[in-house]
Image (cartoon, grey):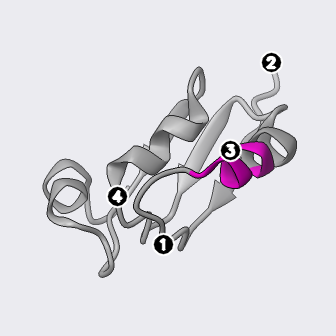
Amino acid sequence: MTIIAGVLSDTHMNCPSDRFQKQIEACFKHCDVIIHAGDLTNLSILEAFQGKKIYSVYGNMCDSSAFSSLKREL
């Protein structure tokens, strides 16, 4: 079985915009797993990846909710 992973980081957004959601759908539609490598800024960004397995770490630009919910490293 092949698993396709998509990787991104440094989204630096407070919430997923319509434009961001469309870009995510276009770029990651065939991915099974998403790896967000930090600086998502706010946990709501992960909502853009509904239905996918997500691995994410916090970065130095993340707010307190992301900082307290995510690990420093995978």
Above or below: residue 12 compared with residue 22: below
Going by the numbered disc 2, the residue's amino acid type is: Met
Residue 22 part of the magenta-drawn span: yes
The numbered mark at residue 21 is 3
Residue that badge 4 annotates? 42
Evaluate if marks 2 and 1 touch, with contact meaning CB atoms under 8 Å apart: no
Going by the numbered disc 4, the residue's amino acid type is: Asn
State the CA–CA distance, disc 3 to disc 2. Answer: 28 Å
The residue mark sitting in front, 2 or 1, is: 1
Going by the numbered disc 1, the residue's amino acid type is: His
Going by the numbered disc 3, the residue's amino acid type is: Gln
Residue 28 in the image, given as x and y percentages of width and height: 78, 42
Which of disc 2 and disc 4 is earlier in sequence? 2
Majority SS type along the magenta span: helix
Residue 3 in the image, given as x and y percentages of width and height: 75, 30
Residue that badge 2 annotates? 1
State which region is magenta: 17-23
Residue 11 part of the magenta-drawn span: no
